[in-house]
Image: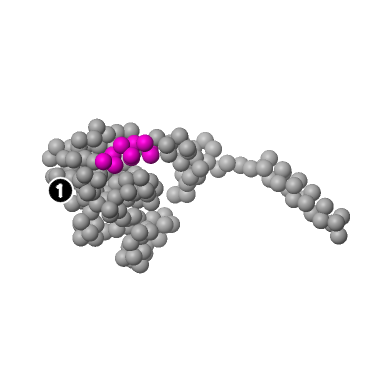
Amino acid sequence: YRFFRKIDNTLKFVALIILTLLFMDPYKGTSVPIINGISNEREIYKPNNVTYLMLKILSWKPHFERANVRFAFGGAQAIYAYYLENNYAIEAECGLTDSYLAHRKISMRGRVGHEKEAPLSYLQEKGIHLHMSGEEGHWGEEKYKGYIKGLPGEINIIYDDPNVINILRQHPDIQFPNY
């Protein structure tokens, strides 16, 4: 019995070595580690990138607190909600934080986990000031789009509260057009 167990462990070890040597990285050579909507998050969320983003977000926190911002975010932007610790933040792509969105019917299959986007009217009903998106060209008119220096994507103004926007504008990273 010990003999077979020893052979079994040896085979597992040899198989592990062979499979490691034969491993092909399908993302190798791609400019962004995303293929058909599937990402290699290990490459996207590298420790240096996460630390950079965390420090940036923590610098915004006093402004978000003072303005009492209510915001929506996509799944990849959950780090905003985590470090800003807002009174109200809603994940607006798949319903992770909202039962209404979680129970919406999927009208058309798309990128898995990104098919239950919050309707603009629902975000307005919830009094959401901003939608923080990693994508550009997501919603609304150009005059209602803000940007954060050093980060991709945009901030879409959902509920236009001049007091909120003016407080956020005081941070040098957060830029909104004058409208």
Mark 1 secondary-structure assignment:
loop
Tell me, yes or no, whether the highlighted magenta stretch contains residue 55. Answer: yes
Q: Vertically, is 51 above or below 139?
A: above
Q: Quadrant of residue 103?
A: bottom left
Relative placement, left or right, of 135 versus 162 is: right
Q: Which of these two is toward me, 130 or 23?
A: 130
Relative placement, left or right, of 9 versus 29 is: right
User: Residue 54: image x %, image y %?
Assistant: 38, 39
Residue found 13% across the figure and 45% down from its top: 162
Q: Vertically, is 147 above or below 122?
A: above
Residue located beneath label 1 in the image: 161
Tell me, yes or no, whether the highlighted magenta stretch contains residue 141. Answer: no
Q: Vertically, is 169 above or below 78?
A: above
Residue found 18% across the figure and 45% down from its top: 164
Q: What residue type is labelled 1?
A: Asp
User: Residue 111: image x %, image y %?
Assistant: 41, 55
